[in-house]
Amino acid sequence: MNSLLKACLAGGLLLAAPALAQSDEDDPYAYPEDDAARASDKAQKDDDDAYERRRKLVDETDEFREAAERENDDGFEKLSRLDDPNLGVAVELGAGVLLVDSARGDFSDNRPAMGVRATWEFGRSLDNEPLREALFADLRWLYGSLSDGTNFIRGDTRLHYFTLAPAYLLRFGQSAFGIYAQAGGGIAYQNTGITVGDDETKVNGLKPVIQYGIGLRGRPALSRTLHLTFRVEAMGLRRGYANDFFFGGSAGVGF
């Protein structure tokens, strides 16, 4: 009897050990069908992640292609005004030599001349980047005088040229310097005083004038909103039948 009880007790202990070991595990027993389901879910998730990565890459490629094909008028903000926020307005004082067509048959009567010029770079108002720095116009006043005669008869002439002329500038690369050609028109006001003895007679007149010429222009920056402007130029002034020429330069500031 005792031997039978001992055998039953030993058998119960042997069967209880696996049950105790299984009760200590946190995870439930993994059945084969559960492993297959988890593997299928993981594979599906990997496929979804790969698809999202491919779709994102395709979307970015399409955005770059659309941006490359887009024109300036499709919504891009022009940055030229941010790079150079100046108004394109300048004022210059000039001086040089005025070669006035001689009434005595000589080539010219050479006299000093002076003037002032206001410049507007109207190319900045156009939606064309190459023309932004190329087009400008000058409103100019130029003054010169002549005096000739004897102690008894003498003539004093004062010439005022008022002209408006657009110009095209060809820059030297990306520098602030370039050469330009200019053509325009205006009026020439001539005031002449003829003195005979002690009597003086005034003669005034207006004539249309055509201005044309070439020159060298510089516009180096002094600050972000201020520039030094200067010119060296050769200019012709056609007034009636007379051809006058001006050789000189000017300097000023641009805003």
Image (tube, helix red, strand yellow):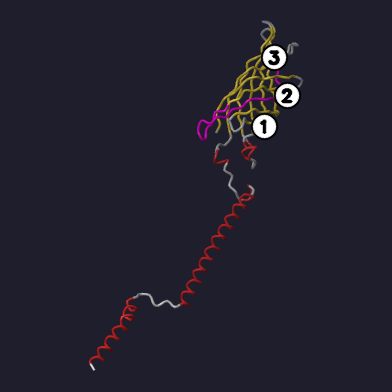
Q: Which percent across, then down, holds residue 201?
A: 69, 14
Residue at the bottom extreme, as displayed = 1
Report the residue marked by disc 3.
201
Pointer 2 local density, CA inside 10 Å: few below 14, some 14–19, many at least 20 = some
Question: What segment carries the magenta color?
Answer: 202-229
Element carrying mark 1: strand
Marks 2,3: beta carbons within 8 A = no
- Our reading of the magenta stretch's main secondary structure is strand
Report the residue marked by disc 1.
168
Side of 82 relative to 25 (left or right): right
Q: Which percent across, then down, holds residue 134?
A: 64, 34
Q: Which percent across, then down, holds residue 14?
A: 30, 83
Q: Which one is nearer the viewer's eye here, 68 or 86?
A: 68
Q: Residue at x 73, y 22 (%)?
A: 239
Marks 3,1: beta carbons within 8 A = no
Side of 53 relative to 98 (left or right): left
Q: Depth-wise, is mark 2 or mark 3 nearer the camera?
A: 2
How far is the residue under mark 3 from the one under mark 1? 43 Å
Residue type marked 1: Tyr
